[in-house]
Amino acid sequence: MTIFDIMGPIMVGPSSSHTAGAVRIGLVTRNLLGSQPIGAELTLHGSFAATGSGHGTDRALIAGLLGMEPDDPRIPQSYTFADQQGLTFQFSNGVLKDAHPNSVQIRAMDRNMKRITVVAASLGGGRIRVTSVDGLPAAFSAEKNTLIIRSQDRVGQVAAISNILSRSNVNIASMQLYRGAKGGNEILVLESDEPVPANVCQEIRSCDCITNVTYLEVGGAE
C-alpha cells in the first residue's frame, strides 16, 4: 500500500471515483482522439448515471475533454469553458454490457470529423481503466507509457512492432491484442517502462496496415 492509496489523488472534489476518475476518463478520450473535440455524446452507466450529477461527474468528464487535469480549479465551471471553446455535448443514461458500475461511453468528434468511441470505468482513488476503443475490447489504465495501435490483422505485424521497440531500447511491460476477426480490425495495446520517442512512434505509423497510432505518455500525450 502506498501513500496514494491512503490519501487519494490531488484533485478537485468531491469524489475521487466520480470526479477525479471522470476527469481522467475525459482527458484520456481527448488524447486518444488526438485533438480538441467539438462534439461529444456521453452515456452514463450504473452509479455514474444514478448519482453522478450530485458528484459533478458530468462537469468532470467535460473538463477532461477540454484538457483539464483532476486538480484544475476550473472543473466546476467546465460547461462555461466548453461553450467558450466550441464543444457541444449531450448526456444520457444507459446500460453498458458487462461494465463496471462507474462507467461511461464517450463518442467524441473533432473539427476534421475524426471520431472515437471510448468506454472506460473509474475504479476509485482516481484510477481508471479503458475497456473499449472503437468497439474493440481493451484493458489499460493510462498509468504507464502506453501505445495504442489500430491496424488490420496481418501475419508478423506484432513481431515487427516489437522489433522496432527493441531496437530503440524500449522495454515492453505488457502487451494485449484484440481483434474483431481474422484479417479484420485489431487493437494492440503496449505498455512500456520507458518513454517511446517520437521517431519510434512515426516508424510504427509507417508500417503496412497500420491505421492509427496513439501514444499516451505518463504526464502527457503524443
Image: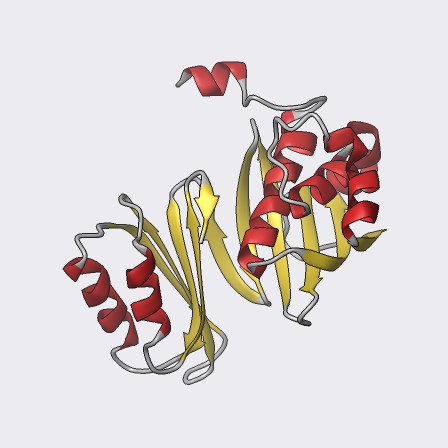
Can the viewer see residue 119?
yes
Which quarter of the figure has residue 117?
Answer: bottom right
Residue at (63, 31) in percent of width and height: 20
Residue at (83, 35) in percent of width and height: 53
Residue at the bottom extreme of this rendering: 183
Residue at (45, 38) in percent of width and height: 219
Image position of 3 with respect to 109: above or below: above
Image position of 70 with respect to 45: above or below: above
Relative image position of residue 27 (x, y in whole percent): 60, 45
Residue at (80, 42) in percent of width and height: 49
Count how many numbered circles sit on residues in the image: 0
Please state if 128 lies on the left or on the right of 101 as rendered. left
Image position of 180 with respect to 34: above or below: below
Relative image position of residue 95 (x, y in whole percent): 76, 54
Can the viewer see residue 142?
no
Relative image position of residue 30 (x, y in whole percent): 60, 52
Image position of 60 with respect to 45: above or below: above
Question: What color scheme is it?
Answer: secondary structure
Relative image position of residue 164 (x, y in whole percent): 22, 65
Please state if 125 lies on the left or on the right of 154 as rendered. right
Which quarter of the figure has residue 222?
Answer: bottom left
Quadrant location of the N terminus in the rendered image: top left
